[in-house]
Every structure is written in C-alpha cells, then in structure tokens.
Amino acid sequence: MSFKKIIKIFDITADCRRYSLDFWQCPNSLFLVMGGIIIVAMILTYWIGIQFVEPEVIIAVVSVVTIILLVIGHSLVGSFSRIAEANKMKSEFVSIVSHQLRTPLSALKWSVNLLKGKRLGELNKKQEEYVDIVSDSAVKMVRLVNDLLSVNRIEQGKLAMQMEFFSIEDLILDVVKGLQILAKMKNVELFFKNHKNLPLVYADKEKIRMVIQNLIDNAIKYSKQKGGFVEISADTDVNSKLIKVSVKDNGIGIPEIIQKRIFGKFFRGDNLVKQKVEGTGLGLFIAKGIITICGGKIGFTSKPDKGSNFWFTLPINTKKINKKAMEKK
Amino acid sequence: MAKILFVEDEPSLQKAISEILTQEGHNVLTASDGEEGLSMSKEKDVDLILLDLILPKKDGFEVLKSLKEDEKTKNIPVIVLTNLEGTGDVEKALSLGATTYLVKANYELEDVLKTVKEHLK
C-alpha cells in the first residue's frame, strides 16, 4: 500500500470536497471535532477533579464544554439539512426536466408514427430509412427519460407500483419472443427452459417486464462473438415461498474488480471491458429498486470469459393467491 | 363513426391524434383547456373523451370529477392521456372514474387508437 493510499483512508473530508462543502460544513469533520472535544473534556474533567475538589470548578468546565458541543451540533444539523436540500433540488430538477421533455417527445413520437405507418402517404426507400432513424432515436430518448424518472423515484422512495397477480412464465415467454430478433442479430441462442405451471406472483407486471427485459438485454449485449447462448429459467425455491428467475449466459462475464459496483447508478461494464455497447447504465440500478420494492432480491454470479448468471426472486403470497383463485371460480 | 373529444393544450399532439382518428372515420373535436373541454363534453354529445391532466384553467382531475358528477356526462368513457405519472396520479384518476390511464410518451399512436377502439364498443 502506497503512502498516498494511507493518507486517503484518513482523508475524511474527501466526500465533502466532492460536494463542495468546506470543513465547517462537512458532517464528517464536525463529528470528528466533536468526538475530539468530548475526549479532551473527559480527560480535563478527571484531571480537574483530582486537582481541585470544589464542584463549582467542575460544573463551570462541563458547562463551557457543553456550550461548545451545542454550537458544533447546531452547525452539524445545519450541514445535514443543507445537503438534504441540495439533494431534493437535484431530484426536483430531474423530475421537472424529464416531464418537460416528455411532451415534445410525445409529439415527435406520434408524428413519426404517422409517417412510419404510411398514414401520410407512401415513402420512398431513402425516406423510410431516415424515418426509421428518427423513430429509433425517439424511442431511445423516451427510454432515457423514463429511466431518469425511475431512478429519481426509486431514490425518493416514490416509485408508484401497480401490483397484480400474473404468471411469471407467460411474462418471460412474452419478453423472450420480443427479444428473439435482437438475439438473432447478435447470433445468440435465446431460450426459456421450462414451463412448469408455477404459482402466480404478486408484483407490478410491467415493471417486472422491464427487469426481465433488461437482464436478457444485458446478457445478449455482452455475449461472445460466436456460439453465445442465453438461458432463462424460473422455478420455486425449496420451501416454495419464492419464485426465482435466472438469466444465464456464456458471455464475456464481469471482471471481479467491478462486480461490487454493477448495481450502482450510471454504471457501465464497457467502461472497463472497452467494448462499444449501448445503454444508459441505469438498468441494473432500476432493476434492483423494483425487485426490492416488490419484496424480492436480486444478485448474480459471474466469471470473466465464462459467463454470468443474474437472478431475482419474487415472493409468492399463498394466502392472497388462494383468495384470488377462489374469486375467479 | 364516433364523436371523440380530445382535451389537450399542446397543438402538435392535438393534430396527431386528430389525424389518426379522422383517418379511421371518427369525428374529432378538440378543446385546449379544462373549462372548454367540460362545456364541450356537455353540449356536443360525445361518445368518448381523451383527457390530459395538466391543463390550463381547470386541470384534468377537476374536469374528470365534474364529468362524473353530471348525470348527462357520467357514462361517457374517459381515457386519461397524459405525461403525468407521479405517485398517486394513476390511482387518483382511476378512482375519480377514468376508464383507463395512458402515459403519452410510452404509447405509440396505433396503441392509443387500439385503446380508443376497445372502449368504443
């Protein structure tokens, strides 16, 4: 370990500098100062206690120290609320910008829909090509805006969920069907292993669709040039309280040094593996947020060059499901 | 042929929806704010309403509430077509009596048309 690295460990204000807070605004350093004062005060009290027996002196010293601590505590609370305020403003900013972007994006999308659907007349080959480019770009922009909004809501704990009962197998089949074209383009064999009539899960179907889509999308994106496969499976766990969905691939895998960070925001594997892959780097952060809110877990195992296995679980609420099944009858 | 009212303050969106619905043989009326939308739905005897939520003068929630309170307009299906998607917005609109809730940016024009057709039956 180099000398610089050791210094870094003790550099408690590094985070605060990153958010441009000075020493006396930084909660980390203020905590340290407070701790220091408490230690000095205790030693002092002990020392005064054995030197002079008069309690007035001790009371005076303790009072002075308490006042100093109160003042520091006050600025500590202040710095916390300033940070919280800044964070809130950032979230509101993202939210407003995203909503404002959605209106022109809708107009763009719908106008292109009319062109592409040939509702405004036939297009020649070249025009069609360019309409496709505009259309694809609009879809990508909508996705990016939606991702930013989702991240924002997850961070604020305000992601609206529309819970319902649905068959996870039917959902996977549907997603796999939709992604076959992409898989073919990348020469990847994509298949869903089994159909076992699993119990229904209770979650937000459209959001779970996003998660499955994202995991499969990633598996295809980071596949090998030749002989790639992506295998999806779904099953109940040992005591049948959870359904586990796995997306296994034999792709390039994830280097160990970045494995810890992959559920973070704006994380992109290609930063390190130097591969040109499209994406916002928000997918796995959002996936984790969604699965956690639905009461499940998400994780993975991966070996570089061997492939990755991403999985998530969703709870089966047997009580509720029975009730629902009876209602249907 | 059905008479459809689209309450939306953004002209480009008004235009796109009008285009596709007219091509499908429907009669499309447009209103640019909540008050106009409300008065038109009472006077023009419409079969279906497409309603935005962020509107000048009277927002979509208020319009929806008034529509459902009036005996005359209570049974007209209302499809909320908006870009608002905050916590509780969907629930609020549905509980006020909206038939369905679509987020504009997430729906292709053909999908909107499909939903309209479904609710005209």
Image: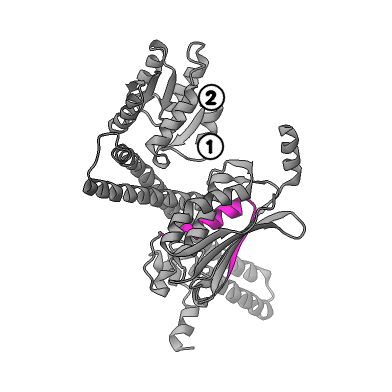
Name the kind of residue labelled 2 in the image. Gly
Which residues are the magenta region?
A280-301
Residue A183 sits above or below residue B103 on the image: below
Q: Chain of mark 1?
A: B
- Confirm whether the magenta stretch covers residue A282: yes
Residue corresponding to mark 2: B97
- The residue nearer to you, when weighing A288 against A313, is A313
Q: In the rendered image, is residue A201 in sight?
A: yes
Residue A196 sits above or below residue A250 on the image: above
Name the kind of residue labelled 1 in the image. Gly
- The residue nearer to you, when weighing A149 against A233, is A233
- Confirm whether the magenta stretch covers residue B101: no
Q: Earlier in the sequence, mark 1 or mark 2?
A: 1
Secondary structure at numbered mark 1: loop
Could you tell me residue A36's position as x and y percent?
Answer: 55, 74
Secondary structure at numbered mark 2: loop
Residue corresponding to mark 1: B88
Q: Is residue A317 left or right of residue B41?
A: right
Q: Residue at left 63%, top 74%? A: A42
